Image: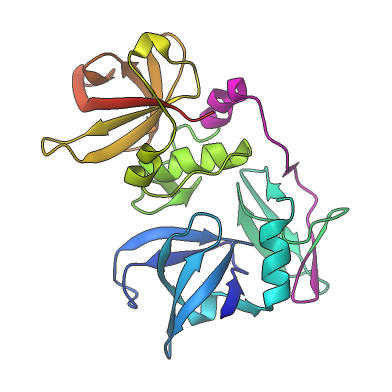
């Protein structure tokens, strides 16, 4: 088995080995993965963080040793806490990194990939936050535009938004909304929920297609066109701008 790490701010994770195919997710700087298959220009990978599978351009990652992969996936994680920042190498070349990027082998403002050292002087997150801090963390992404498969402050989708908020708070969730909905404790009523719990929504066929983070006073923050705050009631999400319901409530879950 071969292993890799993203050494760019972000690399698209594609559904098939083609630049024009669907972007299923993104691989952020420092995220590691198993390489399942290697072709001339593309590799099929499985992310270590959430087991997402897809194709990444061979020019957008570096090979790492099995020992490095094991250490990075088993030891404490350090991630960037800045909306957007940069790291510098010994030649003072800059690489931008987004909020939630991993900082491999981080120690004393330095990180390392394959013996190349980088300096990072921004905020570092490494500990679990209290559940009560999840809403405030979610507000960081307010007005981020919707982007299918995205998970950065420059564009994200509903499940990517929820996953990244939880990651910043020290909790791991799956990438896809259906997988997220499998876990957690079911709550029977909105009144039983607390800020930081998740609400899932389905379509006419009963397929779960959307998720948001519950706030106090029957509000919800979610990514729909952009990361926004709307009203949550027993029917679903009530859009404060259009004065209409946009999503049908399926289930509420307590993840923490």
Task: Tell me: residue 51, above or below residue 177.
Answer: below
Q: Which image quadrant is residue 70 in?
A: bottom right
- Tell me if I can see residue 146 in this picture: no
Residue at point 63%, 39% (across, down): 170
Q: Position of residue 227 (x, y in %)?
A: 41, 34
Q: Quadrant of the N terminus?
A: bottom right
Task: Tell me: residue 20, above or below residue 159.
Answer: below
Query: Is residue 114 rendered magenta in the image?
Result: yes
Query: How many numbered circles does the render carry?
Result: 0
Q: Position of residue 187 (x, y in %)?
A: 37, 19
Q: Which image quadrant is residue 61 in?
A: bottom right
Q: Position of residue 94 (x, y in %)?
A: 71, 65
Q: Left of 172 or right of it: where is 239?
A: left
Q: Which residues, given as a range, are shown in magenta?
A: 112-139
Q: Position of residue 175 (x, y in %)?
A: 43, 49
Task: Tell me: residue 177, above or below residue 229.
Answer: below
């Amino acid at each position: 088995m071969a292993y890799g790490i993203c050494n760019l701010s972000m690399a698209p994770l594609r559904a098939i080995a083609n630049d024009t195919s669907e972007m299923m997710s993104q691989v952020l700087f420092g995220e590691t993965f198993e390489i399942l298959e290697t072709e001339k220009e593309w590799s099929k990978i499985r992310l270590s963080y959430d087991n997402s599978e897809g194709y990444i351009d061979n020019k957008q990652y570096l090979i790492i040793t099995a020992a490095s992969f094991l250490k990075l996936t088993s030891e404490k994680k350090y991630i960037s806490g800045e909306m957007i920042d940069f790291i510098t190498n010994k030649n003072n070349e800059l690489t931008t990194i987004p909020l939630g990027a991993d900082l491999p082998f981080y120690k004393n403002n330095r990180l390392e990939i394959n013996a190349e050292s980088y300096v990072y002087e921004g905020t570092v997150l490494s500990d679990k936050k209290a559940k009560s801090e999840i809403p405030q963390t979610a507000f960081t992404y307010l007005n981020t535009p919707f982007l299918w498969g995205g998970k950065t402050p420059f564009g994200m989708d509903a499940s990517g938004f929820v996953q990244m908020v939880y990651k910043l708070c020290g909790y791991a969730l799956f990438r896809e909304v259906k997988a997220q909905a499998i876990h957690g404790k079911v709550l029977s009523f909105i009144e039983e929920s607390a800020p930081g719990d998740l609400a899932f929504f389905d379509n006419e066929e009963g397929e779960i297609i959307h998720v948001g983070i519950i706030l106090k006073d029957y509000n919800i923050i979610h990514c729909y066109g952009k990361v926004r705050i709307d009203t949550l009631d027993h029917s679903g999400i009530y859009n404060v701008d259009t004065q209409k319901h946009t999503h049908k409530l399926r289930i509420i879950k307590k993840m923490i």
